[in-house]
Image: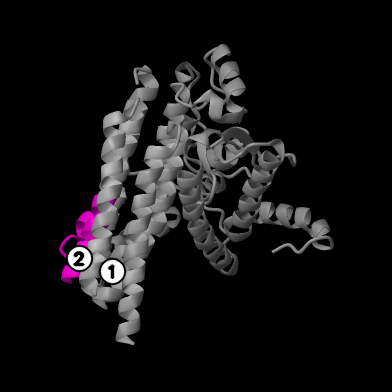
């Protein structure tokens, strides 16, 4: 049963990730791209969580915690510079 | 908006600055919630809540707050656990509603989604409440914070799915309800009393939760 | 009981991943940066709550629960911060589509601020974090 769940989750996460990548490629401004990458990081973390559940281990737990904790630093930094120089 | 008798600036900056503008180090009394939090994070990361690990975590937490001092978070000194629990349950429900709302908008409306930028003057003077209101309203349906005017405690929000003035007023009222809930839970005594007296006349007309 | 828990785990994980999919769809279909911000913030928080719950139940382990609580609490704290920062600079660099905005009460304020002389309202030597968010007049376009 968990294999079926893994397949369904994998497909949905992949579609979400593809949507993010499209937004990163298309994104009219750098802020759109940063936003897309932000969501992409969270989708990867979600994928690692699903992997931990399927294979019954906790190896990626610290990565997930770290991603949730400091994942926002990049987007905050970029948006700081964008609002200063207005070159987005 | 009720008049602000205690100057917001005094309340906010007193604990961090003295009159000469030099920043005080936070005292242990102000910082114990932060220390507790750091120890909890340490133990959670090691997945080990034994006494020795907690002690070591406490040492590291003390080390960290001494080495990297931050201005203290000014807590109000009042907390009502019952209102906190109620707030948290309500918040979880709103988070679920927010996701459904965004999903519906993304799929059904797409490019035709209308939104508005609205100003919401808050009643509170406390930075903590303004910040918490901002955090909560970012995660519940419809809104996120675009800008903050600290001196008048005004939040400027981007509110999604708004097409007429009634909806704008409703949104504003919703934000002020969040503020009320938060003051009931963690606001200072003065603000709690103010909110209570503001709500009392309403009680006869409609049920105030 | 095990059967029930397994089904619960399956539902939680699938719903959690659905939230990621919704975030992706929202990123694609919403018209401008500020509306996309809603899609990027809100579903992820719920999605992580569901996935974490599913993970903890599936591993039948209480020990990872504190770590997951920390991760989720951090998510709650940081998601609004990045949304605010991106939204703020997006608004100030004119990325809000005027056609889809019903009303705009910040625009006028920002114009007034940028027209005013460059003295902040609060004469504190060093602006704290909250004041920097409020924005020095110089950056207000």
* Residue C55 marker: 1
Q: Which residues are magenta?
A: A42-67
> Which residue shows up at 35% across the image and 60% down it?
C16
Q: Horizontally, is A86 left or right of B204 in the view?
A: left
Quarter of the image that includes the N terminus of chain C: bottom left
Q: Horizontally, is A61 left or right of A68 in the view?
A: left
| Residue B73 position in % (x across, y down) | 46, 48
Q: Where, by quadrant of the figure, is residue C53 drawn?
A: bottom left
Indicate how the structure is coloured in the image: one colour
Say what secondary structure mark 2 lies in: helix
Q: Is residue A74 above or below residue B193?
A: above
Q: Does the image show residue A71?
A: no
Instruction: Report the residue marked by disc 2.
Output: A52
Q: Is residue B62 above or below residue B126?
A: below
Q: Nearer the viewer, residue C71 or B14?
A: C71
Say what secondary structure mark 1 lies in: helix
- Extreme residue in the front direction: B108
Q: Where, by quadrant of the figure, is residue A40 drawn?
A: top left
- Discs 2 and 1 lie in a common subunit: no
Does the stretch in magenta take in C15?
A: no
């Amino acid at each position: 049963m968990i294999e079926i769940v893994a397949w369904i989750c994998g497909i949905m996460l992949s579609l979400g990730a593809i949507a993010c990548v499209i937004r990163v490629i298309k994104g009219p401004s750098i802020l759109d791209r940063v936003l897309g990458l932000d969501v992409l990081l969270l989708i990867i973390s979600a994928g690692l969580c699903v992997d931990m559940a399927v294979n019954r281990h906790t190896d990626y737990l610290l990565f997930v915690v770290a991603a949730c904790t400091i994942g926002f630093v990049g987007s905050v930094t970029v948006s700081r510079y964008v609002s200063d120089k207005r070159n987005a | 908006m009720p008049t602000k008798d205690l100057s917001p600036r005094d309340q906010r900056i007193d604990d961090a600055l003295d009159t000469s503008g030099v920043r005080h180090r936070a005292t242990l009394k102000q910082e114990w919630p932060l220390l507790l939090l750091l120890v909890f994070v340490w133990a959670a990361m090691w997945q080990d809540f034994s006494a020795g690990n907690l002690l070591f975590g406490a040492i590291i937490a003390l080390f960290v707050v001494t080495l990297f001092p931050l201005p203290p978070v000014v807590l109000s000194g009042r907390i009502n656990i019952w209102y906190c629990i109620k707030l948290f349950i309500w918040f979880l429900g709103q988070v679920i509603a927010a996701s459904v709302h965004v999903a519906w908008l993304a799929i059904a409306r797409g490019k035709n989604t209308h939104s508005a930028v609205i100003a919401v003057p808050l009643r509170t003077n406390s930075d903590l409440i303004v910040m918490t209101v901002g955090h909560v309203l970012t995660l519940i349906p419809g809104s996120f914070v675009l800008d903050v005017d600290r001196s008048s405690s005004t939040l400027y929000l981007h509110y999604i799915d708004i097409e007429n003035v009634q909806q704008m007023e409703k949104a504003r009222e919703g934000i002020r309800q969040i503020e009320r809930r938060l003051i009931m839970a963690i606001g200072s005594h003065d603000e709690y009393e103010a909110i209570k007296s503001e709500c009392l006349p309403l009680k006869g007309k409609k049920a105030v939760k | 009981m095990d059967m029930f828990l397994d089904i619960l785990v399956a539902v939680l994980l699938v719903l959690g991943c659905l939230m990621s999919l919704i975030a992706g769809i929202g990123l694609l279909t919403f018209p401008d940066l500020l509306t996309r911000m809603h899609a990027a913030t809100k579903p992820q928080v719920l999605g992580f709550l569901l996935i974490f719950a599913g993970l903890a139940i599936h591993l039948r382990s209480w020990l990872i629960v504190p770590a997951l609580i920390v991760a989720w609490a951090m998510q709650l704290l940081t998601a609004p911060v990045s949304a605010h920062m991106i939204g703020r600079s997006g608004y100030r660099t004119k990325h809000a589509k005027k056609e889809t905005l019903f009303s705009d009460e910040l625009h006028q304020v920002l114009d007034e601020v940028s027209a005013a002389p460059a003295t902040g309202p609060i004469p504190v030597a060093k602006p704290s974090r909250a004041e920097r968010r409020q924005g020095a007049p110089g950056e207000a376009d």
